[in-house]
Image (cartoon, rainbow, N blue to C red):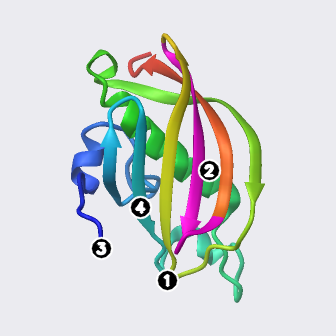
Amino acid sequence: MADVLMNKEQIMEIIPHRAPFLLIDEILEMEVGVRVKARKYIGEDEFWFKGHFPGYPVTPGVLMIEMLAQAGAVCMLSKPEFKGKIGLFGGIDKAKFRRQVVPGDVLDLEVEMIRQRGPVGTGKALASVNGEKAVSCEITFVVADSDK
């Protein structure tokens, strides 16, 4: 089992997400602004299973992309120049859904930044269960001020 670099409380010091929409549990590895490995434990009581789908619980693909985005946000917002800011979606490209993610799965989340220009960047993202790809995509983000 990997060591935990950040727990939920530490993650919440960096990104503004809160329950029920904080969708990552741990940061396992991080090279600030470059790459991150995070984890989400998929419990039977996740809020989405009540309706997706009764009797056949499957984690929605869009929520797995959100989990990847939150991991990427921790990586980018840990940079000193982005402290106190938020990450917003700029785009999702090349999304592929390869396996269902169900209660009891441990979802490993990896994001590697492949481009960044100022407050806009793109990360190559992969979510997997026991080394088996579940979701892959490229996510584009924009770092913005958190006050309107």
- Residue for badge 4: 39
Q: Nearer the viewer, residue 4 or 14?
A: 4
Percent x, y of residue 99 = 71, 71
**Residue 47 spot, x, y in % from top left:** 53, 69
Q: Which residues are magenta?
A: 119-133
What residue did someone put label 2 on?
Answer: 65
- The label nearer to you, 2 versus 3, is 3
- State the quadrant of the C terminus: top left
Task: Name the secondary structure under disc 3.
Answer: loop
Residue 40, percent from left and from top: 44, 64
Q: Nearer the viewer, residue 113 or 55?
A: 113
How many residues crowd around disc 2 within 10 Å: few (fewer than 14), some, or many (20 or more)? many
Q: Earlier in the sequence, mark 2 or mark 4?
A: 4
Q: Main secondary structure of the magenta part?
A: strand
Q: Residue at x 38, y 36 (%)?
A: 75
Q: Is residue 148 magenta?
A: no
